[in-house]
């Protein structure tokens, strides 16, 4: 690992995003719109109070997964990855640089959406609000790491976009948000146990109800382990020599 | 330095089941401008990729500055320009070069120097996607010159450039060689052959000749280098 190179990658990714204000508006605007719709749809009632906090924390996962997989695909296709692989740049420097950049974007995204949700939409969480933001950032890094990994399997942007419903939607369906995990068929719960988003959702739900016990700690540990694992898998897919 | 800057020994490369380079051997002399010439699809880019260490190889060896190609300690000493302009379209010229300079650990002033070398001072603040194809290629070239690499490998750097600019770039290549750098420059247009100190002519993955332009003329008995290339092909067939 080389801090200078990691930072260079982070600054570059941020500079690219700055050049693309429409994407920035979408990154922040879409979760705000969806939280607002959710509130209006359920008149701010229990469903909104139940689903609002987890969604707040899961938006960055979805956004960063998509943004990262496309950015990385472009890097592979344009030849810039090949140029970087011929330079003194470690694979982990590149991955960490991406992770750091999108984590910073997630801080901004989650903070703005939180201010809206807690301030204007009267969303309530019993636990500490900054913890929701912190979990959102962790989820963003997880999304980035998985996006980097998955981008290796996409040859076109069309495929990369389709990986979102293919890999993320099942996780959202099975994480416990729609049906409690204790009410799922056993085999579904087993699958749920194996999916990282289950732990992300669980940690957010525990924060919302202020039940920050052992289970919460396990959730956070699993999320961190998944980030490391996804980055490691991502590093494996980055080949210095290609065919 | 003694010995060649680049030594390719019985290099074999297979891409997607097709043998691109069956068994290629050649040398690049230090401090020279060597032209890598051959028609499109002859294996030039593959050879170049092997020299910078990003090509998976099936056999043989490639040494650069006495080290195996792609070795970690070589990566800051070898500059590489890919065939397609591998720069970020959504960043400005200066932002692109500043990024690559940071990755290389090159001095910050190397960015402005590289911009000057490829004559893009006027465009330094412009977003690359809005530049012409030739300007884009020069940004990519500038990135390969950052940090004063000892070996500079350029894959078709002058394609689509206007003749004046092309001449200027060839002058730059010789200037860099005079300062001690070794340049390997690929091209598919034979009229650039005369601008090289030495030539590697390849066709269908095989080396037809390694010679200076004058040696090539003498050997084939013609003044025209493209004619010489033809005679080599027909003589060797």
Image (tube, coloured by chain):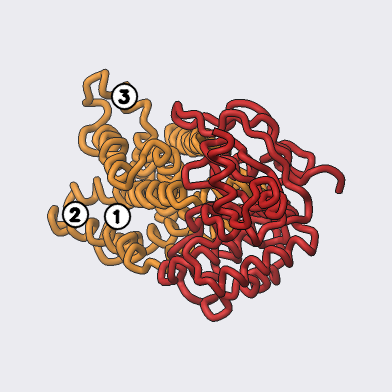
Chain colours: A orange, B red
Q: Position of residue A2 (x, y in %)?
A: 67, 49
User: Which residue is pictured at 46% across the width and 42% down the height?
Assistant: A145
From mark 3 to mark 2, how far is it between C-alphas?
Answer: 28 Å
Q: Which residue is mark 1?
A: A124
Have a look at marks 1 and 2 and say if they share a chain.
yes
Q: Which residue is mark 2?
A: A38
Q: Is residue B47 above or below residue B187?
A: above
Element on which disc 2 rests: helix
From this viewpoint, is residue A182 visible?
A: yes
Does A213 sit left or right of A50 as displayed?
A: right
From mark 3 to mark 1, how far is it between C-alphas?
Answer: 30 Å
Which of the two marks, 1 or 2, is nearer to us in this view? 2
The answer to whether marks 3 and 1 mark residues whose Cβ atoms lie closer than 8 Å is no
The answer to whether marks 3 and 2 mark residues whose Cβ atoms lie closer than 8 Å is no
Q: Is residue A171 above or below residue A83?
A: above
Closer-to-camera residue (A21/B192): B192
Circle on res. A191: 3
Have a look at marks 3 and 2 and say if they share a chain.
yes
Element on which disc 1 rests: loop
User: Which residue is pictured at 44% across the width and 55% down the height?
Assistant: A130
Quadrant of the image occupied by residue A142:
top left
Q: Earlier in the sequence, mark 3 or mark 1?
A: 1
Q: Position of residue B227 (x, y in %)?
A: 55, 51
Q: Position of residue A12 (x, y in %)?
A: 52, 61
Closer-to-camera residue (B70/B171): B171
From mark 1 to mark 2, how far is it between C-alphas?
Answer: 14 Å
């Amino acid at each position: 690992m080389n801090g200078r190179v990691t930072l260079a990658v982070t600054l570059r990714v941020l500079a690219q995003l700055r050049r693309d204000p429409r994407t920035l508006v979408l990154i922040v605007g879409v979760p705000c719109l969806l939280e607002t719709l959710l509130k209006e749809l359920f008149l701010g009632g229990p469903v909104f109070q139940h689903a609002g906090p987890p969604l707040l924390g899961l938006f960055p996962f979805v956004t960063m997964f998509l943004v990262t997989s496309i950015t990385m695909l472009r890097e592979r296709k344009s030849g810039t990855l090949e140029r970087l692989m011929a330079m003194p740049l470690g694979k982990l420097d590149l991955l960490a640089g991406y992770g750091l950049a999108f984590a910073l974007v997630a801080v901004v995204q989650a903070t703005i959406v939180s201010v809206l949700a807690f301030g204007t939409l009267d969303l309530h969480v019993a636990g500490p609000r900054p913890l929701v933001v912190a979990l959102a950032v962790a989820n963003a890094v997880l999304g980035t790491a998985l996006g980097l990994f998955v981008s290796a399997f996409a040859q076109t942007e069309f495929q990369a976009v389709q990986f979102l419903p293919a890999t993320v939607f099942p996780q959202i369906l099975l994480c416990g948000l729609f049906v409690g995990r204790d009410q799922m068929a056993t085999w579904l719960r087993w699958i749920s146990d194996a999916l990282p988003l289950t732990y992300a959702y669980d940690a957010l739900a525990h924060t919302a109800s202020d039940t920050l016990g052992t289970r919460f700690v396990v959730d956070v540990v699993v999320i961190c382990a998944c980030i490391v694992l996804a980055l490691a898998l991502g590093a494996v897919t980055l080949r210095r020599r290609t065919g | 330095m003694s010995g060649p800057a680049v030594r390719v020994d019985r290099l074999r490369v297979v891409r997607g089941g097709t043998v691109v380079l069956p068994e290629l051997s050649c040398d690049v002399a230090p401090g020279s401008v060597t032209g890598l010439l051959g028609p499109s699809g002859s294996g030039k880019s593959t050879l170049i990729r092997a020299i910078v260490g990003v090509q998976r190889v099936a056999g043989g060896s490639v040494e650069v500055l006495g080290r195996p190609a792609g070795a970690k300690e070589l990566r800051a000493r070898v500059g590489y320009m890919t065939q397609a302009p591998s720069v970020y379209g959504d960043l400005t010229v200066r932002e692109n070069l500043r990024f690559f300079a940071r990755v290389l650990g090159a001095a910050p002033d190397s960015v402005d120097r590289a911009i000057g070398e490829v004559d893009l001072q006027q465009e330094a603040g412009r977003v690359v996607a809005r530049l012409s194809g030739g300007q884009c290629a020069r940004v990519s070239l500038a990135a390969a010159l950052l940090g004063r690499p000892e070996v500079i490998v350029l894959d078709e750097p002058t394609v689509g450039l206007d003749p004046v600019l092309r001449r200027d770039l060839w002058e730059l290549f010789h200037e860099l060689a005079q300062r001690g750098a070794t340049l390997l420059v690929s091209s598919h247009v034979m009229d650039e052959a005369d601008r090289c100190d030495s030539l590697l002519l390849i066709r269908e993955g095989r080396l037809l000749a390694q010679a200076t332009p004058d040696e090539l003329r003498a050997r084939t008995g013609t003044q025209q280098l493209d004619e010489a290339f033809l005679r080599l092909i027909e003589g060797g067939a």
